[in-house]
Amino acid sequence: MGEQVDVTRRSLMLGAAATGALGVATATGLLGAGEAAAAEAATAAARTPLWKTAMGRGLLYGSSTATWQISDAEYRKLFKREAAVLFTEDDLLWYRLKPTPQSDLDFTYSDRIIKFAENHRQLVFGAHLVWDEGFGDGWQDSDLWDISEKAARKLLFGTLTSVMKRYRGRVAIWSVVNEAITNGRGEGVHGLRDDVPWFKTIGPEYVARAFHLAHETDRHALLVMNDFGYETVNQYGDRPEDKRRATLHVLDRLLDAGVPVQAFGIQAHLLADHFHHRFHAKAYRTFLRELADRGLKILITEMDVLDDGLPADRKTRDHLVAEVYRRYLDVTLDEPAVASLTTFGLSDRYTWLQEDYPRDDGAARRPLPFSQTMRPKPAFHALHHGLKHAALRHPTFDSPRAS
């Protein structure tokens, strides 16, 4: 029987230089408040936005966000400046679209977030059409697990097609199926998890059917299978080599059957603790090349760094988090099939890790390029450097921001 799903974003997920002289001067009071604000604004204006740095190497850079986050004017300004892609963090999840089994589809929030992206010439990455989470408190286990195959098909595929038809031509990339592949040496069927409601009610063909329907509904959108767990052993002992093997097995079966999986999304929720020892660059490069050899584009879709195992001291922790960014990007962005990089948020002010997985010592999480006060951290500089020095590639996407 499946677990009760709630509104938090990733209850399953983990089964998966400094700031410069300006920050020092401000912190020590050498600048007055007004002078500091003016100097900070001048520094931001002179800094090349991340999306533009990425585009210079044929990459697309973006971030996730949600309507409740961009109601914050300061964060909205940062997001508009830095991102060429908007990954929908909450607003296309079922707790927004269909808060109860009896609810009609409600596009209030999804309309707002897609319009925001369009107004600022950002491509939309829609997430997620098929997932076993994100339903909210209005759904009970029985609403998903104890229904007939016919009812499940109508519920899942009817919602998928309705959402895609509404946003056809407005969403460039869809996460069609999210987190369907077995973790570690977990039981499953041909590499697919069997502990999700759609597998139980419809069967393993739900994945292929979702992709076929998505392609029939919008032949111009890029269709992505998205998952996590490829970098290091996680806290449950799941090994990345097992996840990689299962993933290639699943993809081979789908592609051999003519299923229109066009890209693979790697979430890249990175575990900082001993990352330099546990991340094996050569094996990861090989996995990326194996994906590319199957004709797939690779998208890094939800990158951030869980800072467990790092000291609470901010300066030390920020340096170590930035080192994780550097090591990961040095390997990943060397692969030409990697078409885009999306961080799961821009500022530590809005990170799901603080909401869902607070540190035991009470220190605020610091997983993202910008601080809670929207200032660039060492992670920003590592990200900017990685994008600037990425292998040159032909762009997969025509970004409206380039025009």
Image (spheres, rainbow, N blue to C red):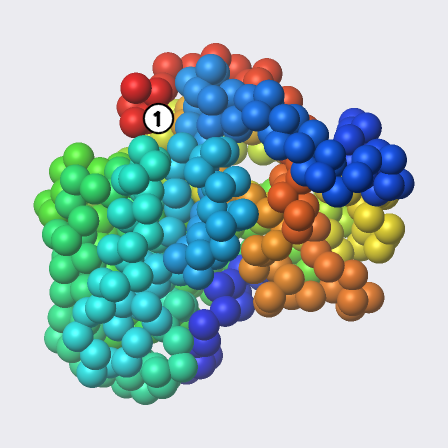
| Residue lying at 26% horizontally and 72% vertically, measured from the top left | 98
Q: Is residue 162 above or below residue 55?
A: below
Q: Is residue 386 above or below residue 368?
A: above
Q: Name the quadrant of the N terminus.
A: bottom left
Return the residue at label 1. 401
- Name which residue type carries label 1: Arg
Q: Quadrant of residue 299?
A: top left
Q: Nearer the viewer, residue 4 or 182?
A: 4
Q: Nearer the viewer, residue 350 or 358?
A: 350
Residue 199 in percent (x, y) is at 31, 68
Residue 374 in percent (x, y) is at 63, 44
Q: Is residue 153 above or below residue 125?
A: below
| Residue lying at 32% horizontally and 33% vertically, measured from the top left | 121
Q: Nearer the viewer, residue 3 or 62?
A: 62
Residue 246, can we see it?
Answer: no
| Residue lying at 40% horizontally and 33% vertically, measured from the top left | 84
In the figure, is residue 77 to the left or right of 33?
Answer: left
